[in-house]
Image: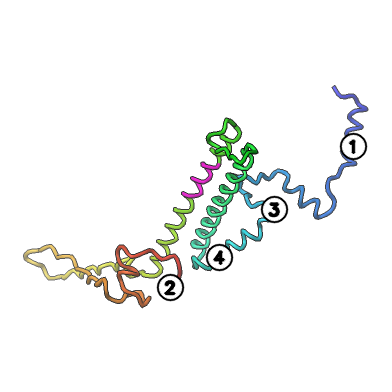
Amino acid sequence: MSTAAQIAANIANAQASSGPRSDTGKAITSKNSVVFGLFSGDFVRPGEEQGYAALHVTLVRELAPIGALEDVLVEEVQRAMWRLRRCGEVESHLVLRLSDGENFILDAMEALNSPAEKIQRSVDRARSQAHRLLHKSTAELRRLQADRRCPAVAKPAQQETPEVSETPVAKQTQSEPVETPEIPRGAQCPCGSGQKYKRCCGVGAPAMLHAA
């Protein structure tokens, strides 16, 4: 059990240690509990901010998002691509550490090294998650952009309900469904893109990931 003198000394020492005083020191200590790992939320390491921002600019230019929802999907694509890049870096560093010094590189899965196997499993799990996120976000972005480019094709117009006549009808017959005119595959696309229907909004047309 601490004595009264020890308690008083601890209080005096705590008063003397006030932590960092400068803005630089406070900025450094604020990151003491942050882990820059494959599964951490803050996975952009110090010094990588410029590259991460450059990737964002490139994706916005190439994918041309419109609206808040498409902006969020582009950010998800960026996170997935950055995590895949980190997985490659971790594997390359792991191979260098496993070198036996005789120009022979041991594979991480073949080395009798439990830490190396654990790291490789973490990399594989992170890469699998990043691939799923990338494919899901890209597919959703394609769908939103296709709906925006060809709203008439993506959402067919609703058929008008025929007015009911007040005159009694002796025999009611089921009306035939109204057939919508089929657009020829070689015709100009109704969205106004200037391309053929089969290469723009037609069934089986290649999905677009850029604005018209």
Tell me the residue at 48%/51% (across/down): 133
Circle on res. 212: 2
Q: Secondary structure at mark 4?
A: helix
Mark 1 or mark 2: whose residue is earlier in sequence: 1
Q: Nearer the viewer, mark 1 or mark 4?
A: 4
- Inter-mark Cα distance, 1 to 2: 67 Å
Task: Return the residue at label 4.
Answer: 58
Circle on res. 46: 3
The residue closer to the viewer here, 185 or 42, is: 185
Dots 1, 4 in contact, CB < 8 A = no
> What quarter of the picture does the N terminus occupy?
top right
Q: Is residue 38 visible?
A: no
Looking at the image, residue 197 sits to the left or right of residue 54; the answer is: left
- Inter-mark Cα distance, 1 to 3: 33 Å
Mark 3 or mark 2: whose residue is earlier in sequence: 3
Mark 3 or mark 4: whose residue is earlier in sequence: 3
Q: Residue 72 in the image: x percent, y percent?
A: 52, 59
Q: Secondary structure at mark 3?
A: loop
Circle on res. 13: 1
Which residue is at the far top?
1
Q: Nearer the viewer, mark 1 or mark 2?
A: 2
- Inter-mark Cα distance, 1 to 4: 52 Å
The span shown in magenta is 123-131
- Label 2 crowd bin: few (<14), some (14–19), many (20+), radius 10 Å: few
Residue 130 falls within the magenta-colored stretch: yes
- Inter-mark Cα distance, 3 to 2: 38 Å
- Label 1 crowd bin: few (<14), some (14–19), many (20+), radius 10 Å: few
Looking at the image, residue 174 sits to the left or right of residue 96; the answer is: left
Q: Residue 6 in the image: x percent, y percent?
A: 90, 28
Mark 1 or mark 3: whose residue is earlier in sequence: 1
Three-letter amino acid code of the residue under disc 2: Ala
Mark 1 or mark 4: whose residue is earlier in sequence: 1
